[in-house]
Amino acid sequence: MFRGFYTAASGMIAQQRRTEMLTNNMANANTPGYKADQSSLRAFPEMLLTRFDEQSSSTPKGVNLPFNKKIGSLNTGVYMQETIPAFMQGDLKETGNQTDIALLDVSLPENSGVFFTVAGPNGEQQYTRNGNFTIDGQGFLTTASGLYVLNDAGNRIQLTSDHFTVNENGVLTGDAGETARLGIAFSDDPNRLMKQGDGLYRTEDGNALGSAYDEAGDGFKLQQGFIERSNVDVGRTMTDMMTAYRAFEANQKVLQAYDRSMERAANEIGRIG
């Protein structure tokens, strides 16, 4: 009976976490460069049930010897193992702003990705697909949250004005003739990157990713005056949220049924005796 409590409760917790993940996807449906999270639900490790008993031996003294008999395996519930971003290309939206730059995947190797390189809060390199940039008061190219955008040498990019051009190969030319090349990083397995919030990612070991210009070749290009939209499928996300909510309700009703059974066992069965 108590095992049923744990199984139903684990299902409720898993669906609650899945609903929270889907709600976060919905909230970021209009965030440039956002990559929708996907959940992975798994059953808890199986338990092998055995029965311990005693069996009399055929010796003259009839000694009782302990033995165990296998009954079978049992799953004890489900849990949400992890959330993994889906690094599919989002649609491009034209904004006309010169500080908006979009990454376009053309022919990247399978399951790989390219990212803008920015300086994290502690100076370490972090990565983003959000190209909604701006120019700060000192002329540095920054993200909307104020992080410095880096060039291909890992240095900040400083301009004399927001009148600059960026070609599809990442070469930036300022109004006064200054030039720089945007730092674009390449990951052969983006699923190993760790989410930092605000559309940022970092590597597990803290080491910098390699240059996409060297490792991805012509597999990508940049487009100025565009931003990459979120790849959240709003319709599908709403459907998944309803499915998760109904699964939560189903587990809740099972839990309530167990609770009523326990109440009757405690209040009525003892009274009959």
Image (cartoon, rainbow, N blue to C red):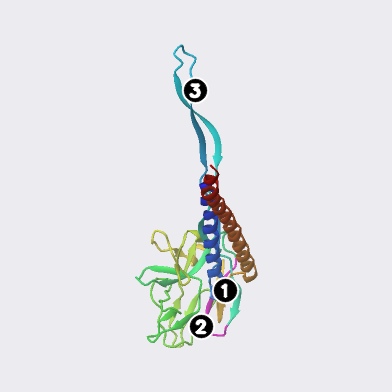
The mark that comes first in sequence, 1 or 3, is: 1
Q: Residues within 10 Å of mark 3 (few under 14, many from 20)?
A: few
Look at the numbered disc 1 and give the secondary structure of its residue. Answer: loop
Residue that appears at 54% across and 73% down: 27
Q: Which residue is mark 1?
A: 29
Image position of 63 with respect to 229: above or below: above
Number of numbered discs visible in the structure rendering: 3
Residue that appears at 56% across and 54% down: 260
Q: Amino acid at mark 2?
A: Thr
Q: Say if the magenta span includes residue 99.
A: yes
| Residue furthest to the top | 60
Q: Residues within 10 Å of mark 2 (few under 14, many from 20)?
A: some
Look at the numbered disc 2 and give the secondary structure of its residue. Answer: strand
Residue 120, percent across and down?
A: 39, 71
Q: Horizontally, is 41 left or right of 207 in the view?
A: right
Magenta stretch? 95-106
Label 2 vs label 1, nearer the camera: 1
Q: Amino acid at mark 1?
A: Ala
Q: Amino acid at mark 3?
A: Gln
Q: Quadrant of residue 125?
A: bottom left
* Camera sees residue 77: no
